[in-house]
Image (cartoon, helix red, strand yellow):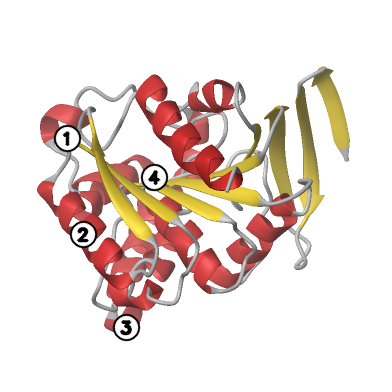
């Protein structure tokens, strides 16, 4: 189902194989690029709200609400394989090869999808976190579920401080949580199911050309993750770009994505 809003922006939904309805936006023209959002966010509440329009100057950009967030539905039980199917359903909307850009845990999800055979031509990853050790007994996930059921605002803050490690000065600058933010917070449990056990070596079989980006102002561990991926993967490179903690501005990021994806498309 598709609804035209402007000649170059469309919104619609696709149905994933398990019946979940996935909402998406398509805008721009050119080679196809799918954006995979980070934890507990949606198209409306992404920390990169203006990046799709910037990229749409060069690409046909698909953004979508991951299952359980925004306008997308959910089917139980959760499994990361269902997220792979959601991404494949979005990719199927495109004409020709599709590149994927992922941010933070969305970048790790895109890597996992590529490793599972989802047809992604090239990968651009902004600061993907790697949780090398598995979580025996799913203790982190259980703690997340307990907090989600008790207090969504507390669960959001706990995830940011105890799991992600957001510095307090950064956290204090974030805007107040909206009702949608609180609803989306329920999906932190999803991230804590697929992130544990994501060592760099797990992606040694991902042969797609991959650009791993980190900000020059980010947490030092992000450089370690990027270096480990470049060492493990057969065709990966790292770039450090001017930015802020866990972020790079639209213009700088767009230039890097365009250079990497379009240069590859011309070969």
Q: Residue 258 carries which label?
A: none
Residue at (33% x, 22% y) in the render:
175
Which badge, 4 or 2, comes first in the chain's sequence?
4
Rendered position, 31 above or below 178: below
Relative to 218, is 176 on the left or the right? right
Q: Of residues 120 and 41, which is closer to you in this image? A: 120
Residue 162 appears at what percent x and percent y? 19, 53
Rendered position, 115 above or below 162: below
The residue that mark 3 highlights is 137
Which badge, 2 or 1, comes first in the chain's sequence?
1
Residue at (47% x, 59% y) in the render:
109
The residue that mark 4 highlights is 152
Residue 32 appears at what percent x and percent y? 67, 41
Residue at (54% x, 65% y) in the render:
113
Rendered position, 134 above or below 108: below
The residue that mark 1 highlights is 216
The residue that mark 2 highlights is 227
Q: What is the spatial separation of the Cα atoms under label 2 and label 1, in whole angstroms?
A: 14 Å
Q: What is the spatial separation of the Cα atoms under label 4 and label 2, in whole angstroms?
A: 35 Å
Whether pointer 4 and pointer 1 mark residues with C-beta atoms closer than 8 Å, the reply is no
Report the mark closest to the observer, 2 or 3: 2
Residue 69 appears at what percent x and percent y? 57, 45
Rendered position, 54 above or below 12: above
Residue at (33% x, 44% y) in the render:
156
């Amino acid at each position: 189902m598709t609804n035209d809003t402007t000649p170059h922006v469309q919104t619609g939904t696709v149905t994933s194989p398990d019946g979940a309805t996935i909402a998406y936006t398509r805008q721009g023209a050119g080679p196809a690029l799918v954006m995979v959002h980070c934890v507990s966010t949606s198209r409306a509440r992404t920390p990169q709200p203006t990046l799709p329009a910037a990229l749409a100057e060069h690409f046909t950009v698909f953004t979508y609400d991951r299952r359980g967030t925004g306008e997308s539905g959910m089917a139980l039980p959760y499994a990361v394989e269902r997220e792979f199917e959601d991404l494949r359903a979005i990719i199927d909307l495109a004409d020709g090869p599709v590149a994927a850009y992922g941010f933070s845990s969305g970048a790790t999800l895109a890597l996992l999808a590529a490793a599972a055979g989802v047809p992604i031509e090239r990968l651009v990853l902004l600061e993907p976190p790697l949780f090398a050790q598995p979580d025996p007994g799913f203790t982190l996930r259980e703690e997340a579920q307990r907090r989600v059921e008790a207090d969504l605002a507390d669960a959001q803050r706990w995830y940011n401080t105890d799991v992600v490690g957001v510095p307090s000065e950064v956290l204090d600058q974030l805007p107040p949580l909206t009702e949608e933010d609180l609803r989306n917070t329920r999906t932190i449990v999803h991230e804590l199911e697929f992130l544990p056990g994501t060592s760099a070596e797990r992606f040694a079989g991902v042969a797609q050309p991959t650009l791993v980006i980190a900000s020059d102002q980010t947490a030092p561990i992000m450089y370690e993750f990027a270096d480990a991926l470049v060492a493990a993967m057969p065709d990966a490179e790292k770039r450090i770009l001017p930015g802020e903690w866990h972020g790079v501005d639209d213009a700088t990021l767009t230039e890097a994505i365009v250079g990497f994806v379009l240069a590859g498309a011309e070969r």
